[in-house]
Amino acid sequence: MLESLQNLANGFGIATTIHNLFYCLIGAIVGTLIGVLPGIGPIAGIALLIPATFGLNATSAIIMLAGIYYGAMYGGSTTSILLNVPGETASVITCIDGYQMAQKGRAGPALAIAAIGSFIAGTLGIFGLVFLAPPLAQAALAFGPPEYFSLMIFGFIVLSNVTGTSLLKALMMATIGLIIGTIGLDPVTGDTRFSFGSVSLLGGIEFVAVAIGLFGIGEVLINVHQPKELLDQRVIVPRFRDLYPSLQDLKRSIGAILRGAGIGFGIGLVPGPAPVIATYSSYMIERKISKHPEEFGKGAIEGVAGPESANNSSCQSAFIPLFVLGIPFGPVTAIMLGAFLIHGVSPGPLLISQHPELFWGVIASMYIGNFILLLLNLPFVPFFANILRIPKRILLPLIILFCMTGMYTVNNSIFDIWMMLLFGALGFLMRKWAYEGAPLLLALVLGPKLEVAFRQSLMISHGDFGVFVNRPISMAFLFAAVVFLSIPIIRIIFKKKGGEGNRDKVKG
Amino acid sequence: MNRDDIIGGMVIFIFGAVTTFLSLRMPIGNFRMPGTGMFPLLLGILLMVLSTLFILNLFFKNKKIELREKWFCLSELFPAQLILFFGAMVLATAFFKQLGYPLFSFLLMITLLRILGTKNWGFIFLLSLVTGLVSYFLFVQWLKIPLPKGWLGL
């Protein structure tokens, strides 16, 4: 523990250089803007800004990109509360009570509690990251190719189970992502696959093109598809002096904040869209244990404090599997993995020992970033809210221009823009037909690692598939994956039995 | 169950089948030493199995297919505004290098603003000009990103 604190102190030394403070601030501001603006979430936002980090060293780049991630969580609550439109998917739950509070003239306290709760929970999450990551990294050294393969399979199954409404659809998307990931060079032998003689495809499909296409361009096209009247929007802008919550508000919120922090931290450690699950779980728990459950849905402050805290805390703990195992458990951390690789850093059990300045510098910057966001989000709420006054008919073309420019800068290649547009069209169709993009993106990023782990495992075992079940950690992950696969079938069986029971009761 | 789900399932099945076919033309190896085509082959087969299960599940859940007046409601799925918007992006990409970045950004903004219903030409022109200039100075002059120069040579 003492060693971790000492390392954290060194991390602060790195994070508080003028250079890194500047990039932390930029990341926090841009992240908040991205969170505030509906139509572009943290995935597309981080993907768009990866090219802007090419001239930076790895530590500064990751500091800025991480700032965008948790900044977007802060910003997302602003549109949820003021507009009843979630700025990003994890802020959906905040719409329920946050908007009701705004309707009653209490937008200020709602925004303030969301910011304060996010700060407290984010800080607690960072401390969890500091003390859990090093011992987990030690444990991860016991992982070999079979364990990595099984863990990734487990991650795909869980993500597919909790994403969208259909497990089969999500699994199909994940498989398509894995197939797209095979385009280019074989990671083991270097042979070309599915390049059709094209030089542009030799390096595979650029994951930034897929990310911006599916989540950025696709979202814009969905907005363009709406009736023209919806391209203009109205927003309530609270005054600065109305922002302060009362003592009663703080008293009611503190329990929800602490519970949300714990829930979010735990959920962030497992695969899946952690912020979304964390906010939903926190809301359900707060409603269950509240002395006034009838207030939920009508402006209960606990319904804002809990979910927003869980949201932010889950963002911090989501970095643990990424840093320690090198495996992202969600689409945003998948993009972050891509950013790491672009900067020549491989996250995993050796990250802490090989790049301590990056690991501890990023963690320290998260604390500073949370503090900056608390300072930014309260006084600058009227500014961010005014940005929402910009009609979508003006905002959408700006987003498109930014997407296309950013995409070109990755490899100075028009081909990447074409890929982005192709996946944009695909993303639009996927949204219309209720197919989720997150499993596809995660599979695209993890596919090469999964293939290498699979082939190495078979080479080690001389073709014996028993290698995946003879090793206890690998077996545990595969067993958990089977359990998660069985959940929908068990639910159907119980539903049918419940239906038969009711029919018997009616007949009786 | 509607036809969109069935068509989606069939398209995915075809994608899986094509992947399987193309993978068989690569060295597969064996399980002791998997070749280049082994992994995509297994994925292609998996995708065909999943899409088949998906389509069968649709039929078992609801044997009645909802009929629509048209096979594909193309005009609902792709209204004129959407086609024009996407078409403008495609056209701009096709002429990106020839136009050069400043002209590309200016013309793209004008076109997209107009398609989305902004009526005031003065406002459109001004906003597009400001956006083009700001993005030029931001990306080309400040960040020194080598964007296409095109006819203007900027």
Image (spheres, rainbow, N blue to C red):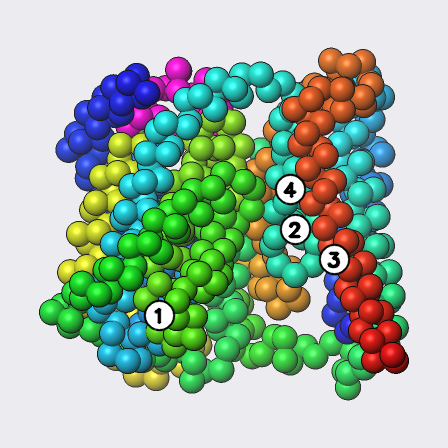
Mark 2, Cα crowd under 10 Å, few <14 / some 14-19 / many 20+, is: many
Q: Chain of mark 3?
A: A
Q: Residue A436, image x and y in percent?
A: 61, 56
Q: Residue at x 28, y 28 (%)?
A: A361
Residues at marks 3 and 1, common chain?
A: yes
* A346 is higher (above) or lower (below) than A366: above
Residue A358 inside the magenta-drawn segment: yes
What stretch of residues is rendered in magenta? A341-361
Whole-number angstrom distance, CA of label 3 to CA of label 1: 32 Å
Residue A284 inside the magenta-drawn segment: no
Amino acid type at circle 3 is Arg
Describe the element under mark 2 as helix, strand or loop.
helix
Q: Nearer the viewer, mark 2 or mark 4?
A: 2
Labels 3 & 1 near each other (Cβ < 8 A): no
Query: Is A260 on the left-hand or right-hand side of B120?
Result: right
Whole-number angstrom distance, CA of label 2 to CA of label 4: 8 Å
Q: Which residue is mark 1?
A: A300
Q: Residue A29, image x and y in percent?
A: 25, 51
